[in-house]
Amino acid sequence: MNDSEKLRAAIVGGKTYLGIELGSTRIKAVLIDETNRPIASGAHDWENQLVDGVWTYSLDAIWNGLRDCYAKLADDVYKQFGCKLTTVGAMGISAMMHGYMPFDKQGTLLVPFRTWRNTITGEASEKLTALFNYNIPQRWSIAHLYQAILNGEDHVGSIDFLTTLAGYLHWQLTGEKVVGVGEASGMFPINISTRDYDADMIAKFDAAVADKGFSWKLGDILPKSLPAGTAAGVLTEEGAKLLDPSGNLKAGIPLCPPEGDAGTGMTATNAVAPRTGNVSAGTSVFAMIVLEKELSEVHPEIDLVTTPSGDLVAMVHCNSCTSDINEWVALFEDFAEAIGAPQSKNRLYETLFNKALEGDADCGGMLAYNYYSGEPVTGLENGRPLYTRLPDSKMSLANFMRTHLYTACGALATGMDILIKKEKIAVDNITGHGGFFKTPGVGQRIMAAALKSPVTVTETAGEGGPWGMAVLAEYMALRAEGESLEDFLTNNVFSGSVSVTMAPDVKDVEGFEKFMERYSAGLAIEQAAVDSLK
């Protein structure tokens, strides 16, 4: 039996594992075999919409995108192996973390989905941070809920269930109101001892809103928190039809706890053990460092979340990373077409990224900000993409591109300096994944300079979150009794993986530091742009 025949038998026999992740610009499904090899995939591109000042995706966009993504996966299976996809050994749903999806008792969404990208909960974030003595970022579900209360929004009294995008989809597919503990940690603080929401903080919240007379208590409307490896329900008949209207997909498939893109990123990079970390760099960028102990103080720039198993993680999350780079590449694409020399997107990215390595280490005095929305780490409530320079700056394509790669890491470096310089945390290894690292050796080299740390990219890093979600589904289905996620990944998933590690170059580090001096000083320019360009 050749390899294709073996894979066909695995597909027909349900010996595969499916991960689906709804990212900010793409929904992607990955099917893996029992060796963790991706064997089929499907994708659907989408974009959030700014509606009445709120970044959102409509329910129609969510479901149409999810179904299209799954249909393309099923079509890929049929084209490669000549069989219909009817079942898998286990599956899981992940999505961009945080946000706000409140439902009433009839299951009706009370307000349009408010995504992580919104920076409209500043008052709630500040007050909850003080109440809990625990950093509550604006993106978190509890910040959105409390801001809605402070705003006096009518829908709050009707809430029966509050969840995230991943939690919503899992609920619709299984009927279970649960999330993975990593996803839960982006809704409300987690008690590391119990791997569940912090009961003392829930009591403080309930007391703080007691005068509002709501019929609910916070603990009653949050989804149940489950650690990785826990059974989280099965695909119902209704859920199967929602995902696959063709009727080929059968009910009864076990689902693992739904996770956020941070948790799947940690899984996909084998960064779930203490002193390990990963950087996910795409539309947004965030670094996750698994801690050995609690931080010494509250830092508004640092989120505390957990691994999918519930271990404490320091997270530096920045709202903008590659979006502005993508727009500039699109401009060069238009130029190439205008002069009669059209180029593929892949070639443009590869050419322009590699050109950046020819630039001056400090970008020749240029400066840019990639802020498509607010950036709490640097104190900006809104964003304006901006490029500027001094008259005597060294204007060149290489310096221009290097500037945009540097600024994609600027806010992240600001937050990471707090962990490294103030908290003195130790990190043995940082693994990178996401579109920023797609061109070999470029994003990796820039990120190593920005973080002043070796950065590793594995051969599976390009698969990203949906692959990590499929691995979490496999972990639930195949793990030995008592086997930790850390051991499962090390022994079963990454034991033979190929990776490349790049140490920071001294000149790059010095150049990046000079760039960051301009970056910090120039934040006033970015604020002026926000104030002036309405």
Image (cartoon, rainbow, N blue to C red):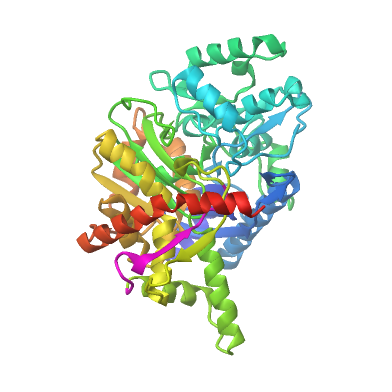
Q: Residue 506: name its quadrant.
A: bottom left
Callout count:
0
Residue 267, x across and y down, in percent:
40, 43
Residue 279, x across and y down, in percent:
38, 49
Is 280 rendered above or below residue 335? above
* Left or right: 112 in relation to 121: right
Q: Is residue 353 among the parts visible in the rendering?
A: no
Q: Is residue 76 among the parts visible in the rendering?
A: yes
On-image quarter of the N terminus: bottom left
Residue 12, x across and y down, in percent:
56, 53
Q: Residue 296: name its quadrant.
A: top left
Residue displayed at 49% across by 20% down: 130
Q: Which residues are magenta?
A: 358-373
- Residue at the far bottom: name it: 340
Q: Is residue 234 magenta?
A: no
Is 46 rendered above or below residue 309? below
Residue 138, x across and y down, in percent:
55, 34
Is 182 rendered above or below residue 71? above
Is 299 rendered above or below residue 505? above
Q: Nearer the viewer, residue 491 or 266?
A: 266
Q: Nearer the viewer, residue 15 or 141?
A: 141
* Left or right: 176 in relation to 2: right
Q: Nearer the viewer, residue 362 or 117?
A: 362
Q: Is residue 363 magenta?
A: yes
Residue displayed at 41% across by 38% down: 315
Q: Nearer the viewer, residue 4 or 388?
A: 388
* Left or right: 472 in relation to 235: left
- Residue at the far front: name it: 391
Q: Residue 509: name its quadrant.
A: bottom left
